[in-house]
Image: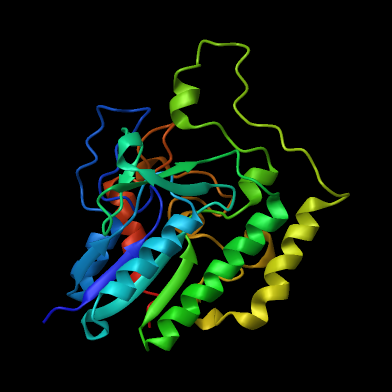
Amino acid sequence: MRKKLIVSGCSFTDKNFTSLSAPDYDCSFPKWPELLAKKLDMECINLGASGAGNNYIYSTLLEEITRTPKEEIGLVLAAWSQVNREDYQNCFTNKHAFSFEDKFHKNMVWRNKRLGRNGDIFYWIKDTLRHYISLENLCKNHDLPYKQFQMINPFEGYLNGLSKTDFEIVNNLDNSNFEKRYKYQPKTKDDRLECFKLPIEYEKFIDTENFIGWPTIWSMGGYAIEEKTLMTDKRHNIKELIISDYDYHPNAKGHQKISEFIYDRLG
């Protein structure tokens, strides 16, 4: 019996990803979870969904692990997303193009938002850190091999002024009044420092040996997978590995690079 590789994440993981800003770009190539599963000789269970936040990622992993005989699971991977994203579910009657069917409850769909989440950046970071710990405890309680990592930077993009989507940017190239970023409103004298303190505080509760790139922040000596695979040392996008000048998602070569990078760190 081939064991299962169970993965969840956002658009960098979504097996059905399509580019909104480059709709004619062929994205039918294998994504990194499928490539990694082939290397590991495992069956790929890819739960990734474009736009997903960390509640979706944790919830879908929890459901899949809970409902799968544990002897069938070979590895669990959480590819965490930005902390500012909000995930929620509602009835299928509200289903539209930007919703994702609940695998185990066919009358429900998942939806997400990049902005508009209640709380603030400090709560969102703490909530994500709790998801790290919860996933770790879930896997360890069932004696399951697992790794977790930030696929994209958790919060620095938000602090810098969250970029508008590539779709919005491309559709406003001729609009001189268009602002490419949302303005961040500071909460304290030094929000960045206060945000950096939180991973340090929670580190004692996290098995960092199973967390690739810990503490996830470049300036703290950690990294997100995107930064190590699709970017230069100065964190500029490598054009040969992304879809376009406006869509920074990995292309076929980018997904290959991500799968190889993660594979080399599973030992």
Position of residue 45 measured from the top left corner of the image (x, y, whole percent): 24, 64
Q: Residue at x 55, y 75 (%)?
A: 133
Q: Looking at this view, is 123 or 24 the one in front?
A: 123
Position of residue 144 measured from the top left corner of the image (x, y, whole percent): 35, 84
Position of residue 112 measured from the top left corner of the image (x, y, whole percent): 46, 43
Q: Residue at x 66, y 63 (%)?
A: 126
Q: Residue at x 72, y 37 (%)?
A: 184
Q: On the picture, is 137 further left or further right than 243?
A: right
Reply above or below: 37 against 87.
Answer: below
Colouring rule applied to residues: rainbow
| Residue 259 seen in this snapshot | yes
Reply above or below: 102 against 165.
Answer: below
Q: Looking at this view, is 267 or 91 the one in front?
A: 91
Q: Residue placed farthest to the right in the image? A: 189
Q: Residue at x 65, y 77 (%)?
A: 203
Position of residue 147 measured from the top left corner of the image (x, y, whole percent): 42, 75
Q: Looking at this view, is 81 or 249 the one in front?
A: 81
Q: Which quadrant would the N terminus be assigned to in this image?
A: bottom left
Reply above or below: 2 against 260.
Answer: below
| Residue 261 seen in this snapshot | no
Q: On the picture, is 192 further left or further right than 205?
A: right
Figure disc tally:
0
- Where, by quadrant of the figure, is residue 68 drawn? bottom left
Q: On the picture, is 241 further left or further right than 162?
A: left
Q: Residue placed farthest to the left in the image? A: 1
Q: Which quadrant would the C terminus be assigned to in this image?
A: bottom left
